[in-house]
Image: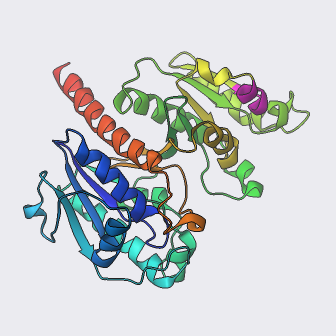
């Protein structure tokens, strides 16, 4: 049995709706896992009625009373449901849900964390300085060696820099960071994704991958030296010309792609996986996944949101947990 805890996300976005839809999927299949949902009681009941859910559930505060026979709903204080609106109350609630859920992982009441989309603006309006889930979770472990990854059947990719303005990206790239990222990606592929001898591609930063220094020299001075240091240790290639890499479908020859900045990876990834992609924080002890989309305020409260990405997030969290069990069992026996 794997114990999964879900956050509610922003209650004025699609998070609660797609969560209830996913729970319907889970409990309508053969499910032996324990599912917990951290959400205000009134929000849960609002969306439960809206989607006409058929899940057996109970409200519970004490993890000792969690059960795998029905959905465990851990209630937060009631909050006004105002679909599509960014509010202080929704920001505060989504942040409380995250902290409560992390607490269940830390006190061994849950094994994996699945987070629904939040509004950074709403959370910051509530008085919390918040950059994103990835950074918060890494900080909670005092971990500086982590990567934001994106997983799907079509491709797996990671970012060297995360939520950074374009003008800052070049200054944030170093050979040391690239080497550390590649080593982490290799371990993640083996330990979390069950990929032996992973093939890793590294994208260039500049157009035409710098064209031998004519359009930027980061490839020559930073990226190529980092790759050369690891060539004998891992199956790694690059730096690839980014647009040609995606356009020629070169990504199909690799298990993981390392990109230099957000949109370089996220635009092609979302074009291929908008309703099925999964965000994963690599390098943490805590297993956390989330859908690769936002709060979708424009369709919130209309019962038309697609829950596929959140469902895949749950499946990947379970898969990663099981892969880690196998990995640690094999390393302990070797």
Asked if residue 144 lies in the magenta stretch, the reply is: no
Residue extending farthest front: 52
Of 211 and 52, the residue lying toward us: 52
179 with respect to 303 (left or right)? right
**Visible residue check, residue 156:** yes
| Residue 115 place in picture, x, y as percent | 40, 57
Q: Which residues are magenta?
A: 239-247
Residue 330 image position (x, y, % from top left): 22, 22
Residue 195 in the image: above or below residue 294:
above
Q: Position of residue 82 (x, y in %)?
A: 49, 80
Q: Quadrant of residue 195?
A: top left
Identify the residue at the far right of this view.
Answer: 214
Is residue 228 at all visible to an observer of this figure?
no
> What is the quadrant of residue 48 in the picture?
bottom left
Q: Could you tell me what secondary structure mostly forms the magenta stretch?
A: helix
Residue drawn at the location 67% of the way across and 21% of the way down:
250
| Residue at horizontal 64 percent and vertical 44 percent from the top | 266
Image: 252 above or below 33 = above
Quadrant occupied by the C terminus: top left
| Quarter of the image that includes the N terminus | top left
Label total for image: 0
Viewed as shown, does residue 268 lie left or right of 190? right
The scheme the figure's colours follow is rainbow
Q: 131 or 305, which lies in front? A: 305
Q: Nearer the viewer, residue 107 or 54?
A: 54
**What x and y, as percent, mark residue 65?**
8, 63
Report the front residue among 77 and 181: 77
Query: Is residue 90 rendered to the left or right of residue 200?
Result: left
The answer to which quarter of the image holds residue 294 is bottom right
Residue at image coords 45%, 78%? 90
- Which residue: 46% across, 69% down? 10
Whether 208 is drawn above or below 23: the answer is: above
């Amino acid at each position: 049995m794997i114990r999964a805890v879900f956050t509610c996300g922003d209650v004025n976005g699609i998070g609660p709706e797609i969560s209830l839809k996913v729970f319907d999927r889970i409990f309508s299949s053969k499910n032996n896992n324990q599912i917990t949902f951290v959400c205000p009681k009134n929000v849960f009941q609002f969306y439960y009625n809206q989607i006409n859910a058929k899940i057996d559930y109970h409200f519970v505060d004490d993890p000792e009373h969690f059960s795998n026979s029905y959905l465990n709903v851990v209630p937060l204080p009631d909050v006004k449901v105002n679909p599509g609106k960014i509010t202080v109350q929704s920001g505060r609630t989504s942040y409380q849900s995250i902290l409560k859920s992390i607490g269940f992982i830390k006190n061994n009441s849950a094994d994996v964390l699945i987070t629904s989309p939040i509004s950074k603006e709403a959370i910051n309006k509530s008085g919390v300085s918040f950059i994103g889930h990835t950074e918060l979770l890494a900080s909670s472990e005092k971990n500086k060696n982590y990567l934001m990854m994106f997983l799907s059947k079509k491709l797996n990719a990671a970012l060297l820099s995360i939520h950074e303005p374009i003008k800052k990206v070049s200054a944030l790239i170093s050979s040391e960071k690239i080497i550390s990222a590649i080593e982490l990606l290799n371990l993640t592929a083996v330990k979390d994704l069950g990929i032996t001898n992973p093939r890793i591609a590294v994208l260039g930063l500049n157009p035409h991958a710098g064209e031998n220094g004519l359009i930027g020299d980061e490839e020559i001075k930073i990226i190529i030296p980092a790759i050369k240091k690891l060539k004998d240790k891992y199956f790694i290639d690059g730096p690839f010309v980014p647009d040609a890499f995606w356009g020629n479908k070169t990504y199909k020859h690799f298990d993981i792609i390392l990109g230099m900045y957000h949109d370089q990876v996220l635009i092609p990834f979302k074009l291929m996986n908008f309703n099925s992609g999964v965000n994963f924080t690599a390098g943490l002890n805590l297993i956390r996944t989330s859908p690769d989309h936002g709060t979708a305020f424009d369709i919130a409260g209309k019962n038309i949101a697609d829950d596929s990405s959140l469902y895949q997030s749950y499946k990947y969290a379970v898969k990663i947990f099981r892969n880690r069990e196998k990995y640690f069992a094999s390393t302990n026996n070797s």
